Image (tube, grey):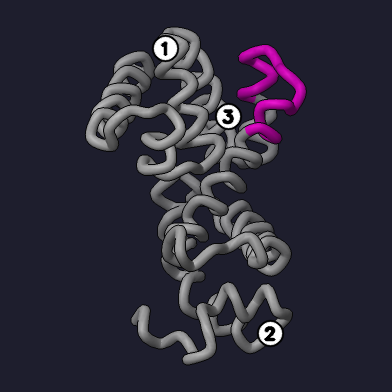
């Protein structure tokens, strides 16, 4: 499917030049994968997914000029952009007013947004877990999951072998999971 790109450059390069047909092709190529990615992240609520997909593709249109074919694939770039939008969404949820547990339950029932409440809880749990990481691990977490850097980029910036970066990221995820339980 990667070879379905038109011969005059990647779809993102064409989108950066304002090509609407390339944008439509890019959308059709990745919207299903993007929806699956969001569902795996716990966004089962159709309206939230639709809003995030719209936000992500708007950013694709506006930020396509920053894509560099020599540094990675379109799908990887889209994934990093999607993760950043997802983190922004979680931050927006987090910055919502804080309610007592009873008020939260009443709002949850009244509004019917269980998924958003779960995401808020998950984000707060992750934040609490991050407080238990070492400074080095916290910095690596931010580079990978907040800034959207690849393992290779982290390796170059930190001067640590790529395998060590992968091992540390795996251990960071384990620590966060353990704290969440």
Residue position for label 3: 120
Q: CA gap, disc 3 to disc 2?
A: 38 Å
Magenta range: 91-105
State the mark number for residue 19: 2
Q: Which of 74 and 52 lies nearest the eye of the viewer?
A: 74
Q: Nearer the viewer, mark 1 or mark 3?
A: 1
Q: Nearer the viewer, mark 3 or mark 2?
A: 2
Check the image and report above or below for 142 versus 181.
below
Which residue is painted at 47% across and 16% down in the image? 130
**Label 3 Cα crowd, 10 Å radius (few <14 / some 14-19 / many 20+):** many
In which quadrant of the rendered view does residue 3 lie? bottom left
Residue position for label 1: 133
Q: Do tag 1 and tag 3 residues touch (Cβ < 8 Å)?
A: no
The prevailing secondary structure element of the residues shown in magenta is helix
Q: Earlier in the sequence, mark 3 or mark 2?
A: 2
The C terminus: image quadrant:
top left
The N terminus: image quadrant:
bottom left
Q: CA gap, disc 1 to disc 2?
A: 45 Å
State the mark number for residue 45: none
- Going by the picture, which residue comes out furthest to the right? 97
């Amino acid at each position: 499917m990667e070879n379905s790109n038109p011969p005059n450059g990647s779809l993102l390069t064409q989108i950066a030049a304002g090509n609407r047909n390339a944008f439509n092709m890019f959308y059709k190529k990745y919207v299903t994968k993007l929806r699956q990615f969001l569902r795996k992240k716990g966004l089962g609520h159709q309206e939230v997914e639709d809003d995030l997909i719209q936000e992500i593709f708007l950013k694709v249109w506006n930020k396509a000029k920053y894509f560099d074919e020599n540094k990675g694939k379109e799908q990887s770039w889209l994934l990093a952009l999607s993760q950043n939008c997802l983190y922004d969404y979680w931050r927006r949820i987090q910055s919502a007013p804080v309610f007592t547990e009873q008020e939260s339950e009443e709002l949850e029932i009244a509004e019917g947004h269980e998924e958003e409440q779960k995401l808020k809880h998950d984000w707060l749990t992750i934040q609490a877990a991050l407080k238990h990481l070492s400074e080095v691990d916290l910095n690596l977490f931010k580079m990978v999951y907040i800034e959207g850097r690849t393992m290779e980029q982290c390796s170059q910036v930190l001067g640590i072998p790529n395998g060590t970066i992968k091992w540390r990221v795996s251990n960071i995820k384990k620590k966060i999971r353990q704290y969440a339980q």
